[in-house]
Image: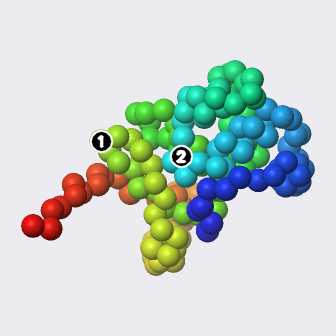
Amino acid sequence: MSQQSHTLDEAAVVNLFAQHHLRFTRQRYAVYNALASEATHPTADQLFQKLSNTDAGISLATVYNTLEVLVKASLAQKLADGGTSARYDATVDEHLHLRDRTTGTLADVPVNLGKRLLDNLPANILHEIESELGFSINRVQIELVGEYAPPTSDH
């Protein structure tokens, strides 16, 4: 459950895309690298702004289309709450998120805490959900929604 942002060199991304049967292009590389280097779960607009500060020469439509291609190839997650712009995450393994309901920002729950919660989900209830609804659960995504406590003074 690696949750750290990272930047991959071009050769690594070429191999990663090939493993996921995805054609490598400079635009896809730029979008994927920009997303993978962010720990903030950016929106497409935020990625576009980041990329517009480079010489990538990528349109907003290309950013949106590339993000959808990355999601379909399981190289990114689309995180939407229905009320705000979708956010994207290049970390695709199971991990938990915190969503600040005031700002809409997302953050990753530390791996050790998220793993403890996921490992302690009652398997019998998951099986019961599958049986009653005829639904096969492939993975569990949990988003904890709230707000950060205001800083306290130590006076």
Task: Classify the position of the C terminus by image quarter.
Answer: bottom left
The foreground one among 150 and 1 is 150
- Rendered position, 12 above or below 122: above
Asked whether 104 or 150 is in front, the reply is 150
Residue at 17% x, 61% y is: 152
Picture quadrant of residue 58: top right
The residue closer to the viewer here, 41 or 116, is 41
- What residue does disc 1 label? 102
User: Which kind of residue does numbered mark 2 sit on?
Assistant: His
Judge left or right: residue 33 versus residue 11: left
Height in image: 8 above or below 114? above
Q: Is residue 21 left or right of residue 31?
A: right
Q: Which residue is mark 2?
A: 41
Colouring scheme applied when the structure was drawn: rainbow
Residue drawn where x is 75% and y is 29% of the image? 56
Secondary structure of residue under mark 2: loop
**Residue 52 position within the rendered picture, expressed as x and y whole percent measured from the top left:** 65, 26
Residue 100, percent from left and from top: 35, 48
**Vertical position of residue 149 compared to residue 62: above or below:** below
Mark 1 belongs to which amino acid? Thr
Return the disc, 1 or 2, that comes first in the chain's sequence.
2
Q: Residues within 10 Å of mark 2 (few under 14, many from 20)?
A: many
Q: Position of residue 141 (x, y in %)?
A: 52, 58
- Looking at the image, how many numbered discs can be counted on the residues? 2
